Image (tube, rainbow, N blue to C red):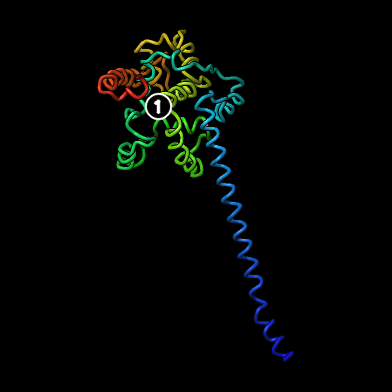
Amino acid sequence: MVKQAKTSSKKKAPAEPAAEKGALKRRALRWVARGLLGIAAFFTVLILVFSFFNPPINVYQLQESVRLGAIEREWVDWEEIAPVMGRSVVAAEDANFCLHWGFDMSAIRQAVAEGGGRGASTLSQQVVKNVFLWQGRNWMRKALEAFLTPAVELFWSKRRILEVYLNVAEFDEGVFGVQAAARHYFDVEAKDLSALQAARLAAVLPDPKGRSASKPTDFVRDRTRSIMSGAETIAIDGRADCFQN
């Protein structure tokens, strides 16, 4: 009887490390799940808060402030921005802004067909990147961007998305937001921008360090004309209704 008991205990012994590993794995998965839920809750709170309150300085602006010593930025509300400025940026960067839910699938398919050299980021995606995340193309940032963009579209109006974009976009090295850009380039307020000036500002996107609105190259001049035409078109065909009305 004693020998049988010893034999039985020897057979069960290997099961103990396996059980411990299983328990450790389950605990690790629980902590990962809690961490992901915590991250989701954190960003959800930020999205809700920034739907009413203006975002503070973001990661990229802080980096540029350290690098340059100072940056130019001043927030202006939607009512203090010339309406043509909003139409110009939409025409330049995301003509289907009023038609999609954060991702322009037709633009993505076209970018894939052209080999990925063409950008397909919507204004909503750019707002998410600029306000909540960081610059770069690593997979973690892109995954968070894909997760947060629909949430921003859900909780923010299209007008709010465009308002935030116009206040955080970089228009020249260290010049952030349409108010700072209007003064920097044309010595006017954002609310007083003409159609030509608004199109020039939109034309420097998405390469503000390589283009100038006050000293335009032939490329920028051509792009400006195209944007002015596009801004008029979306005003007529209804693709500006979601943020103008």
Q: Residues within 10 Å of mark 1 (few under 14, many from 20)?
A: many
Measuring from the top left, give residue 45's x and y in whole percent: 55, 34
Q: Residue at x 32, y 30 (%)?
A: 96
Q: Residue at x 60, y 65 (%)?
A: 22
**Secondary-structure class at tag 1:** helix
Measuring from the top left, give residue 207's x and y in whole percent: 43, 26
Q: Is residue 197 above or below residue 166?
A: above
The quadrant of the rendering that contains the C terminus is: top left
Q: Is residue 51 above or below residue 186?
A: below
- Please tell me which residue lies in front, 206 or 190: 190
Camera sees residue 125: no
Q: Residue at x 53, y 21 (%)?
A: 174
In the rendered structure, which amino acid carries the disc numbered 1?
Lys
Name the residue tied to disc 1.
Answer: 158
37 with respect to 169 (left or right): right
Camera sees residue 53: yes
| Quarter of the rendering containing residue 49 | top right
Measuring from the top left, give residue 118's x and y in whole percent: 35, 36
The quadrant of the rendering that contains the N terminus is: bottom right
Q: Is residue 146 above or below residue 89?
A: below
Q: Residue at x 55, y 32 (%)?
A: 46
Numbered circles on residues, count: 1
Measuring from the top left, give residue 58's x and y in whole percent: 56, 28
